[in-house]
Image: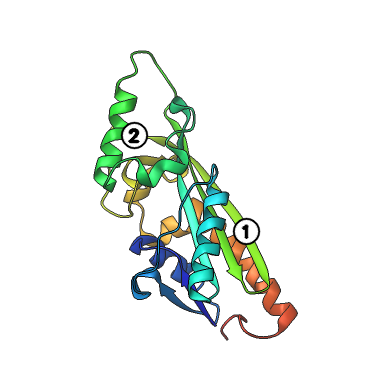
Amino acid sequence: MRFLLATHNKGKVREIRLALSKFNIEFDSLAGQGHLSQALEVGSTFAENARLKAEHYYQLSGSPTLAEDSGILVEALDGKPGVHSARFAPTDKERVEKLLRMLDSFSSPFSRGARFVSAICLFLPDHLIEVTGEVQGELTREPRGTHGFGYDPIFYYPPLEKTFAQLTTEEKNKVSHRARALEKLSLELAGRATQSGRIIAPMK
């Protein structure tokens, strides 16, 4: 079976392919689909946006479509940037710099707590699978590390005493919000494979 990954984000494509590599599934990304119209991400939650994207690209491509929407929620900013995380500024670097400037503007002590949330929707011809995952951390005062993407350089994960950008791919794929959502999806797919006995059965 072939799934369409409804993203242009190469980092997300790598993580999703790796997490689901045990299944007999081939993946295409939007990069190889020509000029499909862009989905409107007008949902108020990550789950709503993931579903909007999955349904939009399923209707256009006719292929089972996996869409993911994720972002960072900062306690001191009342959950912002939230669903606007990817549109907070034009580039990853600018998004990180803007968020740090906003936090630096506070004159009194405040919590630097934050959490990453990932919502995944898999749109199949006869079924819809929706899962979420999240991870709690803190925001650093400056970027650290060169791995990952997005807000990873300023998201500090206390259990490993590193930012996500300082983690290896293997480390991040064990603890990240997306990894946790993908683990739930993997369990759902394994259950469907057991019921159907075909299509997405794990590789031997």
Name the residue nearer the viewer: 138 or 4. 4
**Residue 146: percent from left, percent from top:** 26, 52
User: Does residue 148 sit above or below 85 in this rendering?
Assistant: below
Which residue occupies the extreme top position in the image? 108
Asked whether, in this view, residue 42 is left or right of residue 101, the answer is: right
**Residue at image point 47% right, 72% down:** 4
Residue indicated by mark 2: 140
Q: In what quadrant of the picture does the C terminus appear?
A: bottom right
Q: Give the quarter of the image for residue 131.
A: bottom right
Which amino acid, mark 1?
A: Glu
The residues tagged by marks 1 and 2 sit, at their Cα atoms, a distance apart of 31 Å
Q: Secondary structure at mark 2?
A: loop
Asked whether, in this view, residue 140 is left or right of residue 45, the answer is: left
**Residue at image point 26% right, 47% down:** 91
Which amino acid, mark 2?
A: Thr
Between discs 1 and 2, the one toward the N terminus = 1
Residue indicated by mark 1: 130
Examine the rendering and report whether any part of residue 175 can be seen.
Answer: no
**Residue 57: percent from left, percent from top:** 49, 67
Q: Secondary structure at mark 1?
A: strand
Name the residue nearer the viewer: 82 or 104. 82
Which residue occupies the extreme right position in the image? 195
**Residue at image point 37% right, 13% down:** 108
**Residue 54: percent from left, percent from top:** 53, 63
**Residue at image point 46% right, 39% down:** 82
| Other-residue count near label 1 (Cα within 10 Å), few / some / many at <14 / 14–19 / ≥20 | many
Of badges 1 and 2, the one in the foreground is 1
Q: Are marks 1 and 2 in contact (CB under 8 Å)?
A: no
